[in-house]
Image (cartoon, rainbow, N blue to C red):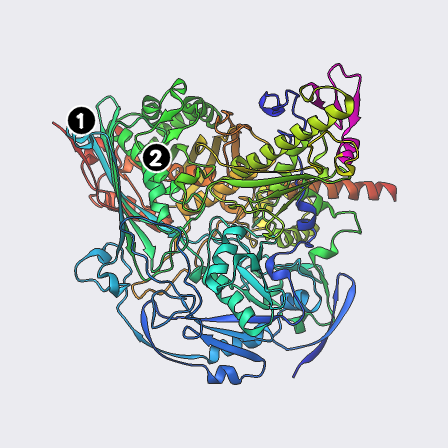
Amino acid sequence: MKKNVTISVNGIDQRASVEPRLLLVHFLREVAGLTGTHIGCETSLCGACTVLLDGRAVKSCTVLAVQADGRKVTTVEGLADGDKLHPIQEGFWEEHGLQCGFCTPGMIMCSHDLLEHHPSPSDSEIREGINGNLCRCTGYQHIVAAVRNASRKMSKRATARAGAR
Amino acid sequence: MAKNGKASSNGKAAHWVGKKLKRKEDPRLIQGISHYTDDFKMAGMLYCVLVRSPHAHAEIKAIRTDAARALPGVVAVFTGEDTSAVGGIPCAMQMPDLKVPRHPVLATGRVRYLGEPVAAIVAEDIYTASDAAELVEVDYEPLPVVIDMEKALSSDTPYVHDQFNSNQAFTHTLKNGDIEAAFKKADCIASQRMLNQRLAPIAMEPRAVIAEYLPGENRLTVWSSTQIPHLLKTQISVMVGLPETAVRVIAPEVGGGFGSKLNVYAEEGIVPWLAMKLGRLVKWNETRRENFLATIHGRDTINDVELALKKDGTILGMRARILADLGAYHQLLTPLIPQLTALMHAGCYRIPAIQIDIVGVFTNKMSTDAYRGAGRPEACYNVERIMDIGARELGMDPVEFRLKNFPQPKEFPYTTITGLTYDSAKYQESLKKALKLAGYDALRKRQKAGWKSGKYYGIGVSTYVEICAIGPSAATPAGGWESGTVRIEPTGKVTLLTGASPHGQGEETTFAQLIADELGIDPGDVNVIHGDTLAVPYGIGTFGSRGTAVGGTAAYLATQKLKAKMATLAAHLLGCKPADITIGRGRLSAKGGKKSISFGELVMSAYTARNIPAGFEPGMEATHFFEPSNFTFPFGTHIASVEVDAETGEVKIEKYVGVDDCGNVINPLIVDGQIHGGIAQGLGQAMWEEVIYNEDGQLITGSLMDYVIPKAHFFPEFTLDRTVTPSPVNPMGVKGVGEAGTIASTPCMVNAVCDALAPLGVRHIDMPLKPERVWKAIAAEQSGGMDPLPPELSSAAKRGTSAKAGKSSTRRRP
Ligand code: FES
Ligand code: FES
């Protein structure tokens, strides 16, 4: 009793016939072939699998593929605009916000959600904002700097855009 | 080394070394387009799931696999009987009285720890394999379990391995100086029992293994999330019985290791064997639950430490008895870790006599092995805690006490009582810098003022030294050297093949920086290749803060060989002597600077080889195997300022300062990142982390819900600075930095909390300092109904009493 689903992943419709128990993270990795979304626990506790579902951050290991049917998913692969990195990606690069990089896609997607709803967070708001995502390498300090860096860039660009209008 | 005020070895100012270069590895990682082992999906790949023991100790009576086999999509099911020809999981250590049990890849007869694998399922997809695992029926007859390492040594204990008639796995004593006399003439003996709890490394990427066997080529390729691809290749060839030349190991992107992937695991024998047996590609992926159960743990020691002191604070001697819980079997380095602990008990102090006795104990638990710091955090914890306790007994400030017992900078290289030769250090400078950064005097003032209003502020100081750049081969079980091959390709682009396979340390950037300076090129033109045993000459791996100091030095020395070769060719082409050639940015020039040749032209002419000196080997490639003459000994001072709520036991970390000295710094951004991560892990141990098995050997902290990995909001911003004392052990003067933060921060934090609670009489609290535990320690002291006393009175009142958390005492001679 497989079910047909159509999930828009990074703007491209992915159609497949899936078992109802298939996790969204497995759909993304195995069906859509996008392995940037990582699995660190499968129990909603580490955040490595964070993606955007209709614009909001979710842990894709606790969403079933069938629940995402007809909805829009953005993964880390969908952030950059061709060769142009997303400001959050730039922030992580510039501030050394990653070491092994395993938590990074989830951190970036979670930060995306944070900055979307809270464009200029304080350091402690950043720390609270990413508290569902674990990083074992960085001690978080450079991640906080990365999000701060991205926030600056994004608001500068938003101001520039508003000015141009 | 420009940033460090030094010129690079060729006399020119360094251009790249010392710069905060953005990492070369990051673009692929931040776009999610890099490949960790689990990201590979090959056609025809099968999935393996392991059936694991739900008991800590049991006889396997029967295993029924029919139902699992019958499930559509299941390809095969194997048990220990099938894999009996697969070689055991190796332990690299040899010691005179070491007991080494056979450690099969799948249990046969008995299981000895929770999560030990008993059967392997192979199926067309992971969901089916997991379903089939549920269908395997195993009849177990539970046996009495050995959990408490002290009870494990008593006479009426069950045994983990019956054939040894004992749970004692080894003993080890390190003794030097007249220890008996030291304790006899002491004015004061500070002693404390301290538990160093069991930890789980928890790399965010769980382990994963893929294997493919091509019988025609007789080629076994294994992708594994490992820190040691070459050593693993050797061991896999032994386990599966193939010539080593037929085995290729690839460590792709590795998502953190912290020592947990410095090992050879059952799955690294099983999965290759399955691929050979079935003639199909097989993948196994660890779940987080399995990671808690069956990836090595760290620490887990009971330490009775004593310090003999003169009234004026001079250290006369140190004694420690250490019990180390090894778990049920030895993994690769299990028995080595406590020995490293013994070695580092001199800390950064002048200690005239020492005796460390260690007993390794088998229990029905997962093996302990190298976890970030690997033996040194345990030593540093014992040393830095007992220094604080000793200082407090004598009524001395912990800073004054430390300064009194440091060796002076001019005494380096300094030979410790444990027989190590510390390369270089300025402990005083580091301590003073940290005090200033932390505002120590102001913190002490505030602390005193706080007592009046019932506020308990604490200041923890930890002055650490660590043993890094592991290490001279004579002191390691499997070689302590590292390899580097530098190849300048015909187009002038440079490939470095390094044996130091990294997993987040940024070696692709650091090594490119140092080679770029040496060759006068751009780091963007240096491509660092690692982690593929078919491409890279034999190497050891990244662990023990050795990547740059040993692997980087190998790359550096290989580059020196190439520079000599380039000079020879350039001299030939320019008509001068090789000694007159200088390598500048993009050009090689003859003395006087009139004649020169571009880097690209020179390299191309080494390949076209139409005009080369007689006897000149064409091509532009050199390899160096670097054998270090000594370890390096980074050091530093960490200071934590905390407030403890005496009502609730809650600890607030207000300020955390680290001044670290890792010798010369190649990339300050990466060095800071390593320190941050290290501090976070060390504070994790001090405050939150703890692997707990209950008395039945069930793991009750087997998920990220129950085992607390620190989150971002647990920490304040860390304040870092450094001193730079180059190491004389390698030409770049680097020391290593991967473990410093972990080693320094754990005792720093406990010192801070115990300092805060000193007025309440609390002397020691075992980690992790959860509110409940802190509150209990306070309550135990308060149960007499006494009002909190000022510390001067309190320490007098409490002298000689035992703290709740463990046996402790201070004996004063009349
Ligand atoms: S894998 Fe989804 S939260 Fe850990
Ligand atoms: S960078 Fe390794 S877990 Fe975050």
Q: Is residue B705 magenta?
A: no
How far from the left and from the top, in percent, is residue B238? 46, 60
Task: Residue type at mark 2: give it.
Answer: Glu
Q: How many marks?
A: 2
- In the image shown, does B620 or B746 lie closer to the viewer? B620
Q: Nearer the viewer, residue B147 or B362?
A: B362
Q: Which of the 4 image quadrants contains residue B566?
A: top right
Instruction: Specify the segment rendered in magenta.
Output: B580-605
Measured from the top left, where is residue B279 in percent x and y? 59, 72
The image shows residue A63 at horizontal and vertical percentages of: 62, 68
Q: Quadrant of the C terminus of chain B?
A: top left
Kind of element beneath mark 1: loop
Name the residue at 51% across, 78% down.
B132
What residue occupies the far right of the structure in this picture? A165
Q: In the image, what residue occupies the spot 68% across and 65% down?
A: A28
Left or right: where B760 falls relative to A132: left
**Res B795 seen here:** yes
Residue with the most extreme left position: B814
The chain ID associated with circle 2 is B
* Amino acid type of the residue tagged 1 in the rendering: Asp
Residue appearing at x 78%, y 65% in the figure: A12
Residue denoted by label 2? B384
Element marked by disc 2: helix
Give the label on residue B187, or none: 1
